[in-house]
Amino acid sequence: MNHTIQLRMMVFSSLMTALIAIGGYLSFPIPLIPVPIVLADFFVMLAGLLLGAAWGSASVGLFLFLGALGMPVFAGGASGVAVFIGPTGGFLVGYLFCALVIGLVSGKGEASLSKDLAALLLGDFVLFGLGITWLKIVLRVTWNKALAFGLLPFIPGTAIKIMAAVMLVRTLRPFLKQVIPQQSKLSL
Amino acid sequence: MAEITLFHYIPKKTIIHQMDGRLKLVCMILFTMAAGFARNLYDLAILTSVLFMIYMAAGLSVKRFMIELKYFFILAGIIIGAHSFTVPGTAIPGFPIQRITWEGLNSGLLLSWRLIVMIFIGAIMTGTTSLLQFKNAVEWFLRPLPFIPEARVATMFSLTFVLIPLILDQISEMMDAQKSRCIDGRKDPVTRILFLVRPLLFHAFMRAEEIVQAMESRCYSEIRTKPKFKSTLNDWLVLAFSIFICFIIWVD
C-alpha cells in the first residue's frame, strides 16, 4: 500500500486516540437529567465512522493499551489492568467492538445518512450489550438492576451523541475525503 | 486545562530518571495493578507512602501535584460525600450528621484514593521518562508478540502523547472564544457538542496533516536502528522493591 496513506492513517488514528482519552474529561450537562454527557464514547463512534473499521478499532485498541500500561486515560483518571476486570470493564472492551461494528457497517459501499445511523445504533447496541452483561456478572445483580445502572441513565445522552455524530460526519467526510482515499479504509 | 503540566517530562539526574525504561515500565504496570486490586485503605496507605518516596527521590514537586490536581481533589470529595450518604450501613456514632455511614465513607475513600494513586503513578512515569525512552521501552516489549507491528504501535503511542497537549490547547482557546460569544448559555446539548467538536476536529485534522507532512519530509520509516538499553544493579533493585510492595498488597 502507499506509504503516505499509511502514515496519514497512523497519525489520524493516534489523533482519535488522543481525542478519546481527552473526551473522558469533557462533559456537558443535559437539562433535567442528572448524568452529564461524556464525550469518550462519542469519539469512539467518530473513530469508527471517519477512519473505518480497521483504523478506527486500532485507535480504540491503542487507547485501551495506554490505559492498561498505567496512563490515567480511563474515566475519572483510572488506569491499569484491574479496571478491565472491574464493573466498567465490559464498556471498555465494548468500545473496541463498537468502533469495529460502526466502521464495518458504515464503510460498505457509498456512505449515506441511513447507513451511518444504522451503524451507530448497532455499534451502541454492541457497546451496551457487552457493558451491561459484564456489569451484571461482576456485580452479581439481576438484569433489571444492571439495566437500571448501565443503560437507563445513558439513553438520553447516547441519543444526543448519535444525533451529533451523524450531523458532524456529514460535514467532516468531504473534508477528510480530500486526504484519505477510499481504499485505505479497510486495509491496515 | 491546557496548563496541566503534570504529565510533562522534567529532565533531572536522579536514580528514577536514569532507570532503564523497560524496567520502569514494568514497575508502573505493577503499581497500577496493585492500586486497582487494593481492597482496603491500609493497602492504599502503604502504596501511597512508597510512591511518595519515589516521587521525592525523583525530585518532582509536591506543590505542583497538589495545585494541578485540585479539581481531582474536589471530585474525590464529591465521591466520598455521595458514597457516605448513599451506601447503607452502620451510622458513625457521635457524628453530628446522622446519615453518614462507615461503609459509605470507606467505599468512597477507597474509590477516590485509588484514582488519585493511579494519577500519581502516571505523573511519576511521565515526569521521569522522556517520550523517546518510553516509546522505545514499549516497542521492546511488543517485539516478541506476533501480529503486532511494534514500530507502528510505538510511533502511534508517542504521537498520541504529542497530540494530547495540542488538543487541550485548542479546546481551551475555543472555549474562551465561545464564552465571549455567549455559546455556553445555550441549553441544547446537540448544538453545544457540535459547536465544540466541529471546529476542534477540523483544526485537529489539519494539525495532524501537518504532522504527516513533517514526518514524510523527514523520511519517516518503520525500519530504524534498534535502540540500546542498559540496566544497572540499581534498576533491578528498584524493580525488586516494587515487586515486593505489590506482593504485600496482593497477599493482603
Image (cartoon, coloured by chain):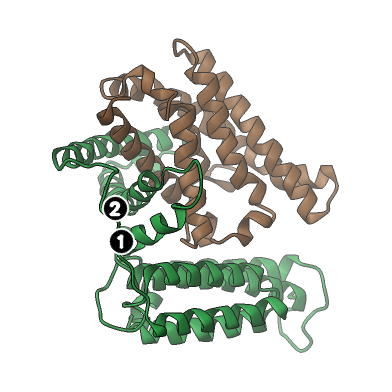
Is B203 placed above or below B167 here? Answer: above
Q: Residue at x 45, y 23 (%)?
A: A186
Residue B210 percent coordinates (x, y): 19, 38
The residue closer to the viewer here, B94 or A185, is: A185
State how far apart marks 2 and 1 are (Cα). Answer: 9 Å
Q: Check the residue under mark 2 and report the chain it is in.
A: B
Residue A130's disc is: none
Q: Which residue is drawn at 58% across and 31% down?
A: A159
The residue at which mark 1 appears reads as: B131
Q: What residue type is labelled 2?
A: Val
Residue B73 in sight here:
no
Residue A123 percent coordinates (x, y): 59, 29
Which residue is the extreme one toward the right?
A142
Q: Which residue is drawn at 50% across and 26% down?
A: A103
Q: Which chain is green?
A: B
Q: What residue type is labelled 1?
A: Leu
Q: Which residue is drawn at 50% across and 19% down?
A: A106
Instruction: Tell me which label, 2 or 1, sits earlier in the chain.
Output: 1
The residue closer to the viewer here, B95 or B152, is: B152
Q: Check the residue under mark 1 and report the chain it is in.
A: B
Residue B191 percent coordinates (x, y): 42, 32
Residue A93 in sight here:
yes
Which colour denotes chain A? brown
